[in-house]
Image (cartoon, rainbow, N blue to C red):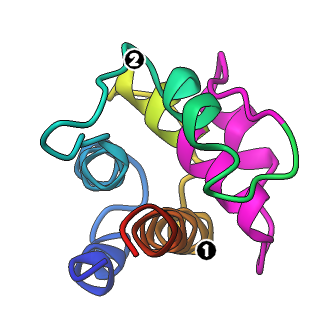
Amino acid sequence: MAESDYRAKQFELVAEGSREPFFLHLFRGCVLKSAPGAPTFSNVNQALGRYSNQLRLRGPIRAGARQFDTMVASLAPNMDIDQAIYSCAQTRNTIGHNLVWSTTNLNPQTYAWLVKNIGVSCIHAISKLYP
């Protein structure tokens, strides 16, 4: 989150071109880290399934999209916590499989929404899993 304002200013430098610096920044915010002694998971769906009650998620969350643009199309401002966590999980799985998506849909607005969803998801997980 601390880098998001700096990164957002970089959109002005290059109208078209690689979005890899933005993808790397978003991906780093979504990486799962297990606390010492906590179970390890092979994917984000397993982790969300294991902790869904503690996170107070209303339904199952399946992460992943085949195309970055498909994932971005589902973004909206002020998403509720379930939607934000779903967005974070999709961001992690989609970007984690390819850092060179050819897209014009990662713009300052969608980038800000993704950063917000990732930040909210991290804060929510910390508040519920580490009281």
Q: Is label 1 in a helix, a strand or a loop?
A: helix
Residue 10 placed where, x, y %?
27, 72
Disc ID at residue 109: 1
Left or right? Give the position of 52 relative to 12.
right
Left or right? Give the position of 37 relative to 101.
left
In this view, 43 is above or below 9: above
Rendered-image quadrant of the N terminus: bottom left
Amino acid carrying label 2: it is His
Between disc 2 and disc 1, the foreground one is 2
In the image, farthest residue toward the left: 36
Residue 16 placed where, x, y %?
41, 50
Asked where in the image residue 11 lies, by quadrant, the reply is bottom left
Q: Measuring 36% from the left and 77% from the top, which residue is drawn there? A: 8
Disc ID at residue 97: 2
Q: Residues within 10 Å of mark 2 (few under 14, many from 20)?
A: few
In this view, 61 is above or below 81: above
Asked where in the image residue 34 lies, by quadrant, the reply is top left
Residue 4 placed where, x, y %?
32, 77
Q: Nearer the viewer, residue 109 or 32?
A: 32
Left or right? Give the position of 79 relative to 13.
right
Q: Residues within 10 Å of mark 1 (few under 14, many from 20)?
A: some
Q: Measuring 64% from the left and 28% from the top, which residue is drawn there? A: 63
Range covered by the magenta-colored residues: 60-89
Q: Nearer the viewer, residue 24 or 83?
A: 83
Q: Is residue 105 visible?
A: no
Q: Is 69 inside the magenta-drawn segment?
A: yes
Rendered-image quadrant of the C terminus: bottom left
Residue 90 placed where, x, y %?
60, 36
In this view, 94 is above or below 25: above
In this view, 41 is above or below 63: above
Amino acid carrying label 1: it is Gln
